[in-house]
Amino acid sequence: MSVLPALQAELAVATNRLLATAASLSDADLAAPSLLPDWTRGHVLAHLAQNADSHLNLLTWARTGVRTPQYASFAARSAAIEAAATHPVARHLAELEDGAARLAAAVRDLPAYAWPAQVEGMRPPPHPAWYLLVRRLREIGFHHVDLAAGHTPGDWPAPFVRRELHDCLATWPRDHKAVGRIELVEDGRITATHGLGDGPAVRGAPHDMLAWLTGRSRGEGVSLVPVGRSSTPGRGEVGGDVGAGLPDPPPWLTMPAPADLPTTPPEDYP
């Protein structure tokens, strides 16, 4: 048994939740700003629909062995999103549903030999095709929040948070010195510590930490650990003023995939 069935099931749930949110919006709602600079909600939905097709391109590459770029170019990607951003809700929803259905069918029908095939997005490194499911889940999970339409980091499923924190730290730019240690806290106790080098320590619940590290919050639920303070969080230490004293995290997703992924689909990931 591999991780593929679990990722497919998670993707189906995440897609259905996104479609439900999109269906709740009006045409006027789509013109409102998203959480992403210079993008409306319409831009976000256009990107998500077109991103499904971009993953189909990479699955074609894996199946045929013929290099098939995810997008023709960064410029073509941006132009296509801009052109579709002002479409009415009904068209956005139809394109999201169609792209999701075609992607699900391509994933279901991909032969076993293709999952270890190396493909590459718009930036290196190359990665095995099975990791495309993780990448598509990432797109849906973060951009669903970016719609600013009721879905928040607190709604992220635990497997998503665990996996994205793992990959965020696995691709951490090691020349970044502003954060030296990350402490994850659950039920009032530290459950994981990640040393990153010199720099201050920060502490927070996993979903709060992921939201801050990926630019989806100003630091709600994340606190700076005072120098010399015990590693055991005290009452009121997790949280505090939004962003108070926090350093700037490094740019997120400098790499679309960790460099040391297993070639064949693992039993679990991470």
Image: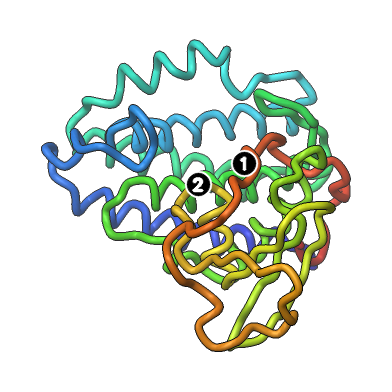
Q: Which residue is mark 1?
A: 252
Say what amino acid the circle numbered 1 marks: Trp
* Residue displayed at 45% across by 63% down: 220
Residue 84: horizontal and vertical position, in percent?
A: 30, 23
| In the image, residue 57 above or below residue 49 | above
Q: Which residue is mark 2?
A: 215
Residue 142: horizontal and vertical position, in percent?
A: 48, 49
* Residue displayed at 67% across by 28% down: 121
Marks 1 and 2 sit apart, C-alpha to C-alpha, by: 8 Å
Mark 1, residues whose alpha carbon is within 10 Å: few (<14), some, or many (≥20)?
some
Helix, strand or loop for disc 1: loop
CB atoms of marks 1 and 2 within 8 Å: yes
Residue 217 versus residue 118: which sits nearer the camera?
Answer: 217
Helix, strand or loop for disc 2: loop
Q: Quadrant of residue 44?
A: top left
Q: Earlier in the sequence, mark 1 or mark 2?
A: 2
Say what amino acid the circle numbered 2 marks: Gly
* Residue displayed at 27% across by 53% down: 149
Quarter holding the C terminus is bottom right
Residue 144: horizontal and vertical position, in percent?
A: 39, 50
Residue 21 relative to residue 158: left or right: left
Q: Count numbered badges in the picture.
A: 2
* Residue displayed at 61% across by 24% down: 70
Residue 188 relative to residue 211: left or right: right
